[in-house]
Amino acid sequence: MFKDYFKFALDTISHRKMRSWLTMIGIFIGIAAVVALISLGQGFKQAINREFEKIGTDKLIILPKTGVGAPGANAAVELTEEDLDVVKKVSGIENVAGFVFANSKVEFGDNVNFFFIVGLPEGDERDLVAELQSLEIKEGRNLRDNDKSSALLGASVVEKELLGKNLKARDKIKINGNEFTIVGILEKTGDPGWDGSISIPEETLREVFNEPDKLDEIIVKVANVENINIIADKIKTDLRRFRDVKRDEEDFDVQTPEQLLGSFGDIINIVQSVLIGIAFISLIVGGVGIANTMYTAVIERTKEIGIMKSVGAQKKDILLIFVIESGLLGFIGGLIGVVLGFGLSNAVEFIAKNALGTNLIEAYFSYSLFFGALLFSFFIGALFGVMPARQAASLQPVDALRAK
Amino acid sequence: MRKSIIKLENVWKIYRMGNVEVNALQGLTLDVKEGEFLAIMGPSGSGKSTAVNMIGCLDVPTKGKIRLDSYDISKLDESELAQIRGKKIGFIFQQFNLIPTLTALENIMLPMIFQGVSERERINRAAKLLELVGLGDRISHKPTELSGGQQQRVAIARALANNPEVVIADEPTGNLDSKTGANVLSFLQKLHDTENKTIVMVTHDANLAKVAERTEFLKDGRIVKSLNNKIGD
């Protein structure tokens, strides 16, 4: 019986191609938008999660409060080596690294550009930074403890020819007027900030930029992940005492990966909800389109309904026939929409990768999203078809037969 | 004495058109016997179609009682009525009333769908019925690809789909030329004679009514004259 009703619906939909297409456009635009947004939103969350996984859950980041968005950019409040010493004394810490950033003019032959310069600390601290940012050497070598005028280039510096072509290890560049030798080039990390930066030894950076004491970021690796929140609190308490600030008036931030992830997640969720909400409005409009089409169909097929009733169709049969037809309109529209939606999100991923060089924007695919969207579009179609279908079902057979 | 299959007792049908009440049937009493070929005649507006709709359970009376077999149809809800209608009654209309998007075979299968007949059985029976009405080679033709006479034959096959006890024909030859009309009529007669179906035919043509065993004349919603064409019974 259901099979027959589906066949009726398909017959009718294909019989009135133009109208069916126009009706379905309303649904597939909405579904495509919703699917693309969910796909990109989930993909973004996944990418962020992955980044955090790379960093690991056993690390804390301490930042001056004004410097969250742009570390080191004219922060009125600064962390110093003294803060680093305070942090080092907190128990339960395995390793601590502080580092300092600068912005500077860099020259290579006739090429001039401005770069973000990172001061890499020495020894274990350098390894900690490398671990945090997943730094790997692609060409040449890493900085060493005795290096003075050595520089390590981010992948994009070479790839995007930010300092002209043919830049390679052992070339000489000038940073803030001082000559440096390139010792190595990093693999791409996927973080545009790092990929576009140049790293030099911390001591050298302090000399060249005359920053004897400032730290832009302190990274802490805890010995035992389970204690991370306790240690974060302890660091806060000690730093508050040392910097003489009151609770909740801290001029610094101690961020656990969880917090960072959480706040990122919240922002993504809000943005995503707003966008999906807007897309839903278009779906509702699509649904109203289906209702309209179905009302027209009921009027047009009044006689057919009368015939069906005269040969034994009950109310529920007519209701089902029309609801299935409108549901199918939604479903087919949804199918096109889902395919378009995933196509769209993949296109955005492609553009993001190739034009923006970020792998944070990626399309997320799951069968539950795929089938969920299909089911939902069938449901929208069926829902908006219920009213017209009820009208059809309640027609009196004699009256319906009399229609032209 | 044959047992009655449909019995109308003092049936009234009153339509309300704005403020005016129209009495389509005014105390119609009629007894249709099992296996009978009954013709209903009357001028237009006499209530023939309303009467035949009542007999076929397509419509319910405003007043009065209708019995179909053992059912009192005024006591049935719409769905039960539809179910009984689909099983016991086959309709043949003046306008053929085939569904244009369905093929000849599918049109014949339609009444069986609503009775829950399996697909295989449906195809089987529909094909046999098409054969019976001489359209075995038109299985996948749409109604628009068939002539008027062919369409009416598909409609007859459809009326027989659920092997009903009663076939109701409302001006079955009204849209056909006289030769094709005569064909359809003789087919109805054959159904009556060989399959022992009860046939109720509405017509305004006295010549057609002659093939029936009995003719009831309707005027102003009630029977004004009865004519027995066959003596005996």
Image (cartoon, helix red, strand yellow):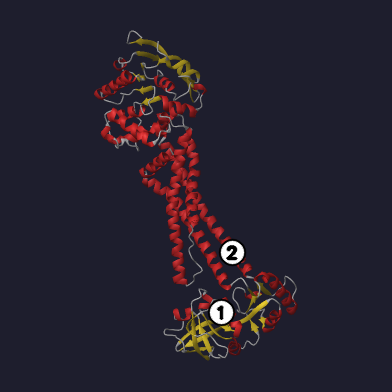
Crowding around mark 1 (Cα neighbors within 10 Å: few <14, some 14 to 19, many 20+) is some
Give the quadrant of the C terminus of chain B.
top left
Look at 32% across and 10% down and name the residue there.
B230
Query: Vertical placement of A247 versus A1: above or below?
Result: below
Residue A13 seen in the figure: yes
Q: Is residue B220 visible?
A: no
Q: Residue at x 33, y 33 (%)?
A: B124
Q: Residues within 10 Å of mark 2 (few under 14, many from 20)?
A: some
User: Which label was assigned to residue A102?
Assistant: none
Could you tell me which residue is drawn at 36 percent across and 30 percent down?
A: B97
When asked about the image quadrant of residue B103, the answer is top left
Q: Label 2: which residue?
A: A265
Residue A21 point in image, percent of width and height: 39, 49
Which quadrant does the N terminus of chain B fall into?
top left
- Amino acid type at image mark 2: Gly
Residue ID at (57%, 70%):
A52
Q: Are marks 1 and 2 on the same chain?
A: yes
Q: CA distance from mark 1 to mark 2?
A: 25 Å
Q: Secondary structure at mark 1?
A: helix
Residue placed furthest toward the top: B232
Query: Tag on residue A130?
Result: 1
